[in-house]
Image: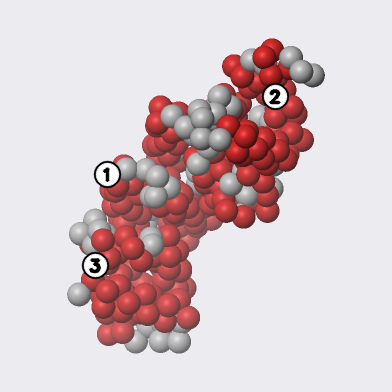
Amino acid sequence: VIFFPFRYVPESLAQLVSPFVRLELLLSGLGSPLAETDRAETEEGRSLSGSMKWHRVLESFEKSHKAAAGGKEDVDGALLPTLVEKVLLPKVKFQVLHGWDATVLGESSRIWDLVCGVWGGLDSGEGAQDLLLTVKNKLHGELDRASVPLWPRKCRRHVPLAEEYTAQAVRRAVNLFSSVMLFREVLDRKVVVLLALNEVLSKRLMPFLRTLKREGLEGGAAPAGQESLACILVHLCRAVSKKWFEDYADDLSLLKQFLNECLDDWQKAGQLKDSPQVAALRQFAQVKARRIM
């Protein structure tokens, strides 16, 4: 026991501890290639690693050593970042690449929690940039699955399952838009604008939304398609934070312009007067316009 401090090799501690870390990751579900991770474990502080026993124990170990060092350099200070980068980061990247369907919003929320869970534990900028690049490539690769068909109304009505197929395509596109906006805090603004606003909203969703609005106005009364349009707009607007509307109003001009057009046209046509979706959109538009001014 007397000679233990002299025989202690800090460089080998991460290798000694990593099997136990991998075991707890396996038990938690993250160690399994395509396993679902319980979101309840990641809600508090958005820290996956902080919710696990190995992280708490090693964090306590580091604090005790820092206190014992008395201001001297702590040789164990890089233990936790090393474990996060060498053990946890590869598994999170695997989940991003192979266990994430970005057109399913629930899965995107799970991946967002995983990314936030390891983000604070990464000590090197290289590991963080590598993780962000993985997320960006995954989101970009999902664009082909977010295409929305522009079939005429007669085709959607008379071809079997055409309406259901179109609805699923719209849902995938809206969810992909929301998934990209989930990562707006860590991805570069230009990347978010390119993927969410240019590729998904402008190129894939907006042609369909304009067609849906035009068909509804031509149909008179208050067709169900207009209620669906209002519901889609609610989902899109809620995916964008107030801060983005305040700080990057120019980037969101297409969404804001189309929202105001829909509200004006519905009011002139006397449509959707009692719709809770339209009431939410009106309140949303008023708040944003007032904030931007």
- Left/right placement of residue 244 relative to residue 86 reads left
Amino acid, disc 1: Lys
Are the two marked residues, 3 and 2, in contact with CB atoms closer than 8 angstroms?
Answer: no
Q: Quadrant of the N terminus?
A: top right
Q: Distance between the residues labelled 1 and 3?
A: 21 Å
Q: Position of residue 33 (x, y in %)?
A: 66, 29
Between 84 and 3, the residue placed more toward the observer is 3
Q: Position of residue 213 (x, y in %)?
A: 33, 68
Q: How many labels does the image show?
A: 3
Amino acid, disc 3: Gln
- The circle on residue 120 is none
| Residue visible at 20% across and 75% down in the picture | 293
Q: Which colour scheme is used?
A: secondary structure
> What residue does disc 2 label?
17
Q: Position of residue 235 (x, y in %)?
A: 45, 64
| Residue visible at 38% across and 50% down in the picture | 184
| Residue visible at 25% across and 58% down in the picture | 248
Between 30 and 166, the residue placed more toward the observer is 30
User: Residue 37, located in which quarter of the rendered image?
Assistant: top right
Residue 118 seen:
yes
- Left/right placement of residue 198 relative to residue 111 reads left
Amino acid, disc 2: Val
Q: Dot 3 lies on which element?
A: helix
Are the two marked residues, 1 and 2, in contact with CB atoms closer than 8 angstroms?
Answer: no
Between 46 and 109, the residue placed more toward the observer is 46
> What residue does disc 3 label?
257
Name which of mark 1 and mark 3 comes first in the sequence: 1
Q: How far apart are marks 1 and 2 (CA)?
A: 40 Å
- The circle on residue 190 is 1
Q: In this view, does 22 lie above or below 251?
A: above
